[in-house]
């Protein structure tokens, strides 16, 4: 791979990355677009998964098997991604968002 020009700072960078990641989920993970929202994907396989894609963030509700498959396919594709945050009764979304913003130096 030869980098001719960095994407960062280019207006189309977010759209290009979103399209790449979206197609990866459809082609490699067997997901289809929901009828409700084109940014919301649902699994067409026997594994449970609902994934919401945004240009700079992803949120998903999956079973453990799909999660492992997703991690494996990310590695195969060579995509670099932040570690996942897993939510549960002891780690509610609000608490995790505040922690994530604090680590990035942002206000919640």
Image: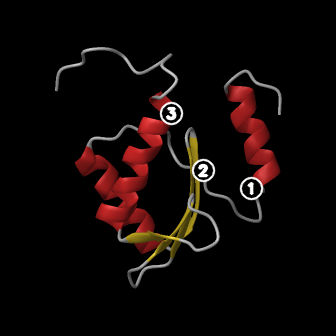
- Give the residue pinned by disc 1: 91
**How far is the residue under mark 3 from the one under mark 1?**
29 Å
Residue pictured at 50% horizontal, 33% vertical: 14
- Give the residue pinned by disc 2: 85
Residue pictured at 50% horizontal, 43% vertical: 83
Spot the residue most to the bottom. 46
- Give the residue pinned by disc 3: 14
Residue pictured at 62% horizontal, 64% vertical: 37
Label 1: which secondary element? loop
Label 3: which secondary element? helix
Q: Residues within 10 Å of mark 1 (few under 14, many from 20)?
A: few
50 relative position to 64: left or right: right
Are the residues tagged 3 and 1 within 8 Å (C-beta)? no
Q: Position of residue 34 (x, y in %)?
A: 55, 72
- Quadrant in which the N terminus appears: top left
**Of labels 2 and 1, the one closer to you:** 2
Label 2: which secondary element? loop
**Of labels 3 and 1, the one closer to you:** 3
**How far is the residue under mark 2 from the one under mark 1?**
9 Å
Q: Height in image: 49 above or below 103?
A: below
């Amino acid at each position: 791979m030869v980098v001719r020009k960095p994407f960062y700072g280019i207006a189309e960078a977010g759209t290009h990355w979103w399209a790449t990641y979206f197609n990866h989920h459809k082609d490699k993970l067997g997901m289809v677009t929901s009828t409700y929202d084109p940014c919301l994907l649902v699994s067409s396989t026997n594994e449970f998964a609902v994934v919401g894609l945004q240009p700079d963030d992803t949120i998903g509700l999956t079973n453990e098997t799909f999660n492992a498959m997703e991690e494996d396919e990310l590695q195969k594709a060579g995509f670099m991604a932040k570690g996942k945050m897993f939510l549960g009764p002891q780690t509610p979304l609000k608490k995790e968002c505040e922690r994530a913003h604090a680590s990035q130096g942002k206000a919640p």
